[in-house]
Image (spheres, helix red, strand yellow):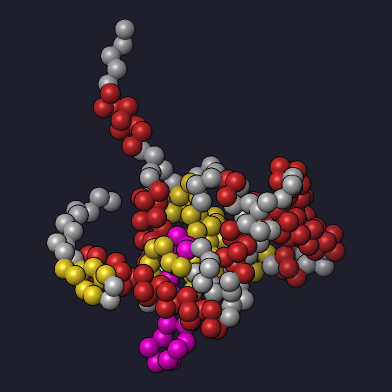
Amino acid sequence: MADYDLFDFAREQRKQASPAEMRQALLGYLCSRNPTCAALNVPLKRKRPAVTCASFRARRSVRKKIDETVIIELFLQREHIFGRCDNPDELRSKIASLSDEKIKLEKLIELTEPELAENDGLFPDFRFFDYTKSKNRNYHKLCRKLSLLQDALHYGSLPEKIRSANAADFCYLAAPAGLLEEDEIPPGWGYLRIGADLEITEIKAPEKLETDVDAKLFFAHNIAGKALDGVMFANGLRKIKDEIHFTKPPRKRKIIR
């Protein structure tokens, strides 16, 4: 009988990152973008759910002006991403089929409309095509149909509620590797894939969304408030009923990665 090492089994199980570690990695990703402020578990709006993490960027020279707000929402289960539609499996199947057809049409456009290629001169072998300027009517018709199906799939979902708050310029959906396909991401959202080693990879870039000035400013205040909570906790301060109490500061941790 082969020897069974319980500690090897425990180490293998430990390779699966915990939700807390994923949130930490996502916050690190946000901070790498050099925001003015970033925080975890930020209330989006009154009577709206809190988002996993968020950041904002503001210029010191302009008062009450928020240049950019970013949201990252972590999902660990597929069913939490989609809305309450009657036939989600059927919709996902149609979306996958149309996505395959879209890729084929894009390859056709590359051959028939080479003038749409853009090249910055640094990488002559790599060309980016602006398919939105294509004259192929079938391509634009397919894109509109694909967008309608994606809207139907996500109608009433958490991503749709977050977007409808009009508080974020850019929204990312984050999920562990293997949980989602790119064509299942809500329209306008970016997609961050979390690897087993907690490496964050941007699979899909987000589109700039329409925002409301007041909602954006309110959200930035919420981000700053949550960031202050973290500063107070790290320095042994706790606010209870408008009174500041002093506690023992948490121990500093060594760098693990």
Magenta-drawn segment: 50-68
* Up-down relation of residue 45 to residue 96 (above or below): below
Q: Position of residue 172 (x, y in %)?
A: 53, 61
Q: Left or right? Give the position of 168 relative to 226.
A: right
Residue depicted at x 16% and y 68%: 246
Quadrant where the N terminus sits is top left
Q: Position of residue 227 (x, y in %)?
A: 34, 70
- Number of numbered discs visible in the structure rendering: 0
Residue at the far right: name it.
137
Residue depicted at x 38% and y 44%: 17
* Up-down relation of residue 178 to residue 255 (above or below): above
Residue at the far top: name it.
1
Q: Is residue 59 visible?
A: yes
In front: 250, or 5? 250
Residue depicted at x 44% and y 54%: 200
Q: Main secondary structure of the magenta part?
A: strand
Q: Does the segment drawn in magenta span residue 108?
A: no
In front: 69, or 257? 69
Q: Left or right? Give the position of 112 relative to 179.
A: right
Residue at the far left: name it.
248
Q: Position of residue 58 (x, y in %)?
A: 42, 82
Q: Does the segment drawn in magenta span residue 64?
A: yes
* Up-down relation of residue 44 to residue 173 (above or below): below
**Picture quadrant where residue 213 is located:** bottom right
Q: Left or right? Give the position of 3 relative to 155.
A: left
Q: Is residue 110 visible?
A: no
Residue depicted at x 39% and y 39%: 16
Q: Position of residue 218 (x, y in %)?
A: 48, 79
